[in-house]
Image (spheres, helix red, strand yellow):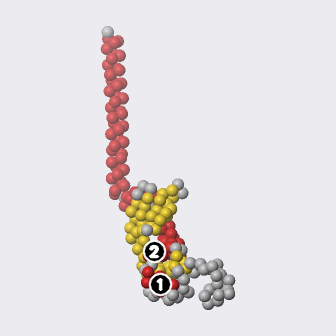
């Protein structure tokens, strides 16, 4: 019976010892984690580096939520430059016998783009922008493409007569982007 008691006491002792080691080990880990946090907070460079990493991670997540600013600006410039004069089939009115040119004059000269707001979604993002530009000298003709819808009827008529509207123009536009496997792509200007 003594041998049996010794075995039971030994087993209970081993069990208790292993539990207390595990518990102490967990406690040490928690204590080490708390010490590390205190150390990080007391070291300004470590704290700054930690904050920088969190900031970069947040920016990376936000970057996935919306198109890049540079991309939006490039798309807006391309949209402005797509505002042209309709091609004529014959020569110019100054020279009826002259051959038609393949040159398509741009109506507007780019000034700047200001992004007012991003409205991101999972698969779609609306970007509110203001596109600034001035009219290039008019040779007459109908304005087509690009910002045609944003140009007033009076300015279109003036430009068609060969007169150039003066001053900087501001066009509030909503660029609508869709997420594709290759990234964000503009699908519409509204």
Density class for disc 1 (Cα within 10 Å; few <14, some 14-19, many ≥20) is: some
Residue 147 in the image: x percent, y percent? 48, 75
Q: Is residue 90 left or right of residue 119?
A: right
Residue 178 in the image: x percent, y percent? 47, 59
Residue at 57% x, 81% y: name it: 105
> Which labelled disc corresponds to residue 149?
2
Residue 144 in the image: x percent, y percent? 52, 76
Residue at 68% x, 83% y: name it: 99
Q: Secondary structure at mark 2?
A: helix
In the displayed structure, would residue 54 be above or below residue 133?
Answer: above
> Which labelled disc corresponds to residue 2?
none
Residue 37 in the image: x percent, y percent? 34, 51
Q: Is residue 175 left or right of residue 22?
A: right
- Does residue 69 appear in this view? no
In the displayed structure, would residue 172 be above or below residue 160?
Answer: above
Which quarter of the figure has residue 16? top left
What residue occupies the far top of the structure in this picture?
Answer: 1
Density class for disc 2 (Cα within 10 Å; few <14, some 14-19, many ≥20) is: few
What residue occupies the far bottom of the structure in this picture?
Answer: 94
Which of the two discs, 1 and 2, sits closer to the camera? 1
* Quarter occupied by the N terminus: top left
Give me the C-alpha separation between circle 1 and circle 2.
Answer: 13 Å
Q: Are marks 1 and 2 in contact (CB under 8 Å)?
A: no
* Quarter occupied by the C terminus: bottom left
> Which labelled disc corresponds to residue 157?
1
Residue at 40% x, 60% y: name it: 120
Q: Is residue 175 left or right of residue 104?
A: left
Residue at 33% x, 39% y: name it: 27
- Does residue 124 appear in this view? yes
Q: Nearer the viewer, residue 36 or 104?
A: 104
In the displayed structure, would residue 190 be above or below residue 123?
Answer: below
Q: Nearer the viewer, residue 152 or 6?
A: 152
């Amino acid at each position: 019976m003594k041998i049996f008691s010794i075995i039971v006491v030994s087993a209970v002792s081993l069990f208790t010892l292993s539990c207390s080691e595990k518990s102490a080990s967990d406690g040490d880990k928690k204590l080490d984690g708390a010490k590390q946090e205190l150390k990080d907070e007391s070291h300004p460079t470590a704290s700054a580096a930690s904050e920088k990493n969190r900031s970069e991670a947040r920016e990376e997540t936000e970057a996935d939520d919306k198109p890049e600013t540079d991309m939006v600006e490039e798309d807006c410039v391309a949209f402005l430059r797509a505002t042209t004069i309709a091609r004529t089939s014959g020569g110019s009115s100054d020279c009826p016998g002259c051959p038609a040119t393949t040159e398509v004059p741009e109506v507007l000269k780019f000034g700047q783009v200001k992004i007012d707001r991003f409205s991101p979604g999972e698969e779609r993002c609306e970007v509110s922008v203001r596109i600034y530009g001035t009219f290039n000298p008019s040779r007459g003709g109908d304005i087509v493409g690009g910002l045609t819808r944003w140009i007033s009827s009076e300015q279109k008529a003036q430009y068609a007569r060969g007169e150039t509207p003066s001053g900087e123009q501001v066009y509030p536009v909503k660029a609508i982007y869709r997420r594709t496997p290759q990234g964000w792509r503009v699908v519409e200007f509204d």
